[in-house]
Image (cartoon, grey):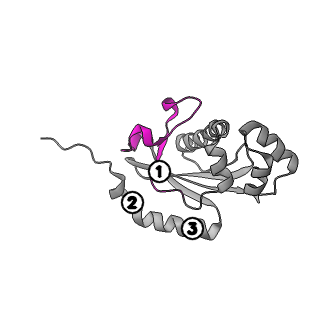
Amino acid sequence: MSEQPYHHTDRAIDLQGWGKMQELLAGITGGTLMIFEEAEHSSAPLSDRHTCSEHGPVCVTSSLLTPVSNDNSFCRALRESPKGHVLCDNYCNRSIKRALELDTTLTFQCYAGLITFAIPVTLDPSHRFLLLGGRVFDTPLTDEFIEELASHVDISPEELKILAA
Protein backbone atom coordinates (compact mmCIF):
# COMPACT_ATOMS: atom_id res chain seq x y z
CA MET A 1 0.00 0.00 0.00
CA SER A 2 1.59 3.29 -1.11
CA GLU A 3 1.59 6.33 1.15
CA GLN A 4 -0.38 9.39 0.08
CA PRO A 5 1.34 12.78 0.05
CA TYR A 6 1.00 14.42 3.43
CA HIS A 7 -0.70 17.83 3.50
CA HIS A 8 -2.34 17.95 6.92
CA THR A 9 -2.27 21.52 8.18
CA ASP A 10 -2.38 20.58 11.84
CA ARG A 11 1.12 19.14 11.49
CA ALA A 12 2.43 22.14 9.54
CA ILE A 13 1.36 24.62 12.22
CA ASP A 14 0.00 24.22 15.71
CA LEU A 15 -3.56 25.42 15.10
CA GLN A 16 -4.46 25.43 18.78
CA GLY A 17 -1.35 27.48 19.60
CA TRP A 18 -1.95 29.76 16.63
CA GLY A 19 -5.57 30.26 17.74
CA LYS A 20 -4.38 31.51 21.13
CA MET A 21 -1.81 33.82 19.55
CA GLN A 22 -4.38 35.06 17.04
CA GLU A 23 -6.76 35.97 19.90
CA LEU A 24 -3.97 37.88 21.66
CA LEU A 25 -2.93 39.75 18.51
CA ALA A 26 -6.52 40.67 17.66
CA GLY A 27 -7.09 41.88 21.21
CA ILE A 28 -3.93 44.00 21.25
CA THR A 29 -4.60 45.59 17.86
CA GLY A 30 -8.37 45.93 18.16
CA GLY A 31 -8.77 44.45 14.68
CA THR A 32 -10.16 41.22 13.35
CA LEU A 33 -7.77 38.38 12.56
CA MET A 34 -8.19 34.99 10.87
CA ILE A 35 -6.11 32.48 8.96
CA PHE A 36 -7.07 30.68 5.76
CA GLU A 37 -5.44 27.77 3.98
CA GLU A 38 -5.12 27.93 0.22
CA ALA A 39 -7.83 25.68 -1.27
CA GLU A 40 -5.36 23.72 -3.42
CA HIS A 41 -3.81 22.45 -0.17
CA SER A 42 -6.95 22.39 1.93
CA SER A 43 -8.36 19.22 3.40
CA ALA A 44 -11.60 20.99 4.40
CA PRO A 45 -14.78 19.88 2.64
CA LEU A 46 -15.95 22.24 -0.10
CA SER A 47 -18.99 23.26 1.99
CA ASP A 48 -16.65 24.63 4.71
CA ARG A 49 -14.59 26.74 2.34
CA HIS A 50 -14.93 30.46 1.80
CA THR A 51 -16.76 30.85 -1.52
CA CYS A 52 -17.76 33.73 -3.73
CA SER A 53 -21.52 34.30 -3.74
CA GLU A 54 -21.44 35.80 -7.22
CA HIS A 55 -19.56 32.94 -8.89
CA GLY A 56 -20.09 30.01 -6.53
CA PRO A 57 -17.54 27.22 -6.01
CA VAL A 58 -15.50 28.26 -9.04
CA CYS A 59 -14.13 31.15 -6.95
CA VAL A 60 -13.19 29.02 -3.95
CA THR A 61 -9.74 30.11 -2.88
CA SER A 62 -9.38 29.11 0.74
CA SER A 63 -10.80 27.55 3.87
CA LEU A 64 -10.90 29.12 7.32
CA LEU A 65 -8.57 27.26 9.70
CA THR A 66 -9.39 28.87 13.03
CA PRO A 67 -12.39 30.75 14.39
CA VAL A 68 -12.37 34.47 13.57
CA SER A 69 -10.81 36.50 16.38
CA ASN A 70 -12.39 39.79 17.44
CA ASP A 71 -14.95 39.65 14.65
CA ASN A 72 -16.10 43.17 13.79
CA SER A 73 -19.86 43.37 14.51
CA PHE A 74 -20.39 45.88 11.68
CA CYS A 75 -18.67 43.58 9.20
CA ARG A 76 -20.49 40.51 10.56
CA ALA A 77 -23.90 42.22 10.14
CA LEU A 78 -23.06 43.03 6.53
CA ARG A 79 -21.86 39.47 5.83
CA GLU A 80 -25.09 38.09 7.34
CA SER A 81 -27.27 40.36 5.19
CA PRO A 82 -28.27 38.62 1.91
CA LYS A 83 -27.30 41.63 -0.22
CA GLY A 84 -24.27 42.53 1.89
CA HIS A 85 -23.00 38.95 1.80
CA VAL A 86 -22.55 39.08 -1.98
CA LEU A 87 -20.65 42.37 -1.76
CA CYS A 88 -18.48 41.13 1.12
CA ASP A 89 -17.59 37.91 -0.66
CA ASN A 90 -16.55 39.79 -3.75
CA TYR A 91 -14.22 42.12 -1.84
CA CYS A 92 -12.65 39.67 0.60
CA ASN A 93 -12.63 36.58 -1.62
CA ARG A 94 -11.09 38.44 -4.53
CA SER A 95 -8.47 40.02 -2.27
CA ILE A 96 -7.56 36.66 -0.76
CA LYS A 97 -7.23 35.14 -4.23
CA ARG A 98 -5.19 38.09 -5.54
CA ALA A 99 -2.82 38.14 -2.53
CA LEU A 100 -2.17 34.41 -2.96
CA GLU A 101 -1.71 34.68 -6.74
CA LEU A 102 0.69 37.62 -6.45
CA ASP A 103 2.29 36.27 -3.27
CA THR A 104 2.19 39.77 -1.82
CA THR A 105 0.59 41.65 1.04
CA LEU A 106 -2.49 43.63 0.05
CA THR A 107 -4.28 46.33 1.98
CA PHE A 108 -7.72 47.35 0.76
CA GLN A 109 -10.81 49.27 1.75
CA CYS A 110 -14.04 47.36 1.22
CA TYR A 111 -17.30 48.82 -0.05
CA ALA A 112 -18.34 49.49 3.57
CA GLY A 113 -15.23 51.51 4.38
CA LEU A 114 -13.40 48.88 6.45
CA ILE A 115 -9.61 48.71 6.03
CA THR A 116 -8.43 45.11 5.68
CA PHE A 117 -5.10 43.41 4.98
CA ALA A 118 -4.29 40.07 3.37
CA ILE A 119 -0.85 38.54 3.98
CA PRO A 120 0.18 35.31 2.23
CA VAL A 121 2.43 32.97 4.20
CA THR A 122 4.25 30.03 2.61
CA LEU A 123 5.75 27.48 4.99
CA ASP A 124 6.73 25.22 2.09
CA PRO A 125 5.21 24.45 -1.33
CA SER A 126 2.62 22.18 0.33
CA HIS A 127 1.51 24.66 2.98
CA ARG A 128 0.30 28.09 1.90
CA PHE A 129 -1.81 30.23 4.19
CA LEU A 130 -3.24 33.70 4.30
CA LEU A 131 -3.68 36.00 7.28
CA LEU A 132 -6.68 38.25 6.84
CA GLY A 133 -7.24 40.99 9.33
CA GLY A 134 -8.02 44.52 10.20
CA ARG A 135 -11.63 45.21 9.26
CA VAL A 136 -11.36 48.56 11.01
CA PHE A 137 -12.39 52.10 10.09
CA ASP A 138 -9.67 54.67 9.57
CA THR A 139 -12.16 57.54 9.86
CA PRO A 140 -15.70 57.78 11.24
CA LEU A 141 -18.43 57.08 8.70
CA THR A 142 -20.56 60.04 7.66
CA ASP A 143 -24.34 59.96 7.90
CA GLU A 144 -24.52 60.29 4.11
CA PHE A 145 -22.25 57.27 3.62
CA ILE A 146 -24.29 55.18 6.08
CA GLU A 147 -27.56 56.14 4.33
CA GLU A 148 -26.12 55.10 0.95
CA LEU A 149 -24.69 51.85 2.36
CA ALA A 150 -28.00 50.99 4.04
CA SER A 151 -29.78 51.20 0.69
CA HIS A 152 -27.42 48.55 -0.75
CA VAL A 153 -27.46 46.03 2.10
CA ASP A 154 -31.02 46.21 3.45
CA ILE A 155 -29.93 47.12 6.98
CA SER A 156 -31.42 50.25 8.51
CA PRO A 157 -29.18 53.31 8.79
CA GLU A 158 -29.92 53.41 12.51
CA GLU A 159 -28.65 49.85 13.01
CA LEU A 160 -25.55 50.56 10.92
CA LYS A 161 -24.81 53.68 13.02
CA ILE A 162 -25.03 51.65 16.22
CA LEU A 163 -22.77 48.93 14.80
CA ALA A 164 -20.24 51.47 13.49
CA ALA A 165 -19.95 53.30 16.83
Q: Amino acid at mark 3?
A: Leu
Image location (x, y in percent) of residue 73: 65, 56
2 or 3: tag closer to the N-terminus: 2
- The crowd level at tag 1 (other Cα within 10 Å; few <14, some 14-19, many 20+) is many
Q: Does residue 22 belong to the magenta stretch? A: no
Q: Amino acid at mark 2?
A: Ile
- Numbered disc 2: secondary structure: loop
Q: Quadrant of the N terminus?
A: top left
Q: Amino acid at mark 1?
A: Phe
Residue lying at 38% horizontally and 44% vertically, measured from the top left: 44
Identify residue for label 3. Answer: 25
Magenta stretch: give its range: 40-68
Q: Cβ–Cβ below 8 Å for labels 1 and 2?
A: yes
Picture disc at residue 13:
2
Picture disc at residue 129:
1
- The crowd level at tag 3 (other Cα within 10 Å; few <14, some 14-19, many 20+) is some
Image location (x, y in percent) of residue 146: 81, 47
Q: Does residue 42 belong to the magenta stretch? A: yes
Q: Which of the two marks, 1 or 3, is nearer to us in this view?
A: 3
